[in-house]
Image (spheres, helix red, strand yellow):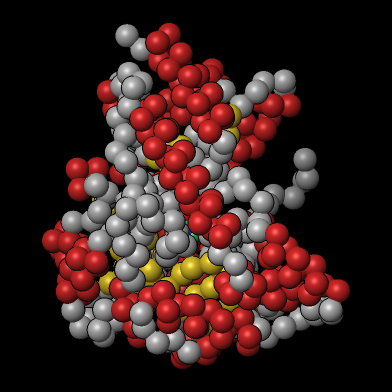
Amino acid sequence: MTQFELRLARRMSRLGTETAFEVLSRARALERQGREVVHLEIGEPDFDTPGNVIEAAVDALHHGWTHYGPSAGLPDLRQTIADYVSRTRGVPVSSDEVVVVPGGKPIIFFSILALIDEGDEVIYPNPGFPIYESMINYVGGRAVPIPLREERDFSLDVNELASLINDRTRLIILNSPHNPTGGVLTKRDIEDVADAIGDRNLMVLSDEIYSRLIFEGEDFSIASVPGFKDRTIILDGFSKTYAMTGWRMGYGVMRADLATHVARLMTNSNSCTASFTQVAGIEALTGDQSSVDRMNAEFKHRRDVFVEGLNKIKGFSCRMPKGAFYTFPNITKTGWPSKKLADALLEEAGVACLSGTAFGAFGEGYLRFSVANSLENLNKALERIEAWTKKNLR
Ligand SMILES: Cc1ncc(COP(=O)(O)O)c(C=O)c1O
């Protein structure tokens, strides 16, 4: 122990975390004690990055892409992303509206840092990716949850959203396909959200990191609603689509004047995203996409098997998620609170999952299981959960 008391800045008490990483380390500790754990807690594809992308990175390393690059990203990658987003979202995007960053997460961090003053209100989905609430609180903003309810298939209630918008609202966060519920907003839902916002001068952070992982429904961005491109920041990236979580590369698409400020935040924090990684990013977006299709088909199959299995377990009921690689069963009929049940499944059944409350207060009554694991392991998890419930639930 040091004799000097650690004197942290006050704002650090407001910074949250992502529980998935904590559960992962508890599961690893159990494994070190000789226990065997099925890992369904972390949200990352279990596949390898496609070979063509790896080769492009190795080639880039051999060709000197080992230096600093521009803070906003390599011009060729920014242009490639602009073309890709123009094509997929049906809205013209130019390269000066793209900022490349190390992962999708920094776009959440930078957007909130750049736009939110103390006391400004930010509406965010709850349950939802925990970093939204953490960052809003960190900068002293007011985090205003919009509950996502199972009976609406985890889509948001637009009338409720409209009632939360006021003159202090600066930012609305949307996430579709959604982590942790797998819900997908329809074109109609998004048009209704746009109507609720009307011509207010506020921004929308549209987290579209799972945009390529839609099994039912459509990929529709609020950026393509007339009048919304200038008020939208699209967050997307390479982590989930191309199984590149450890590479750390994502991007934001936003009006060019905001992009220069976000690039300045990059200059102050990271300087730039790794150069050889960005060269590989061009290959990811423009090269053969068959591995993306293969991974998605596999996720869909696993989802089907896992949801069917969950629905046979006493006390569990699970809607069919329409996108992403998560299942979010309702566990209220077990009579157990979510966190206690998640802890028991890890410690007593050897299945690591997340409590719904890791995604906010409105996640109580649910657990999140990632299906980014092999069918064999998913079936093993189902057997273990079922055996545990038979022993522990009456
Ligand atoms: C909804 C959502 N947004 C953003 C991210 C961040 O992705 P990245 O790993 O690229 O930073 C994640 C990762 O889990 C996510 O689920």
In this view, 295 is above or below 279: above
The image shows residue 94 at horizontal and vertical percentages of 48, 89
Q: Is residue 329 left or right of residue 192?
A: right
Identify the image quadrant of residue 136.
bottom left
Q: Is residue 207 visible?
A: yes
**Numbered-mark total:** 0
Q: Which residue sits at x=74%, y=50%?
A: 4
Q: Is residue 14 left or right of residue 142?
A: right
Q: Which residue sits at x=35%, y=65%?
A: 219
Identify the image quadrant of residue 155.
bottom left
Nearest the eye: 379 or 247: 379
Q: Is residue 13 visible?
A: no
In this view, 206 is above or below 290: below
The image shows residue 85 at horizontal and vertical percentages of 45, 77
Q: Is residue 186 left or right of residue 118?
A: left
Q: Which residue sits at x=61%, y=81%?
A: 77
Q: Is residue 15 left or right of residue 282?
A: left
The image shows residue 394 at horizontal and vertical percentages of 32, 9
In this view, 76 is above or below 319: below
Image quadrant in which the N terminus is located: top right
The image shows residue 99 at horizontal and vertical percentages of 55, 80
Nearest the eye: 198 or 310: 310
Q: Which residue sits at x=49%, y=34%?
A: 353
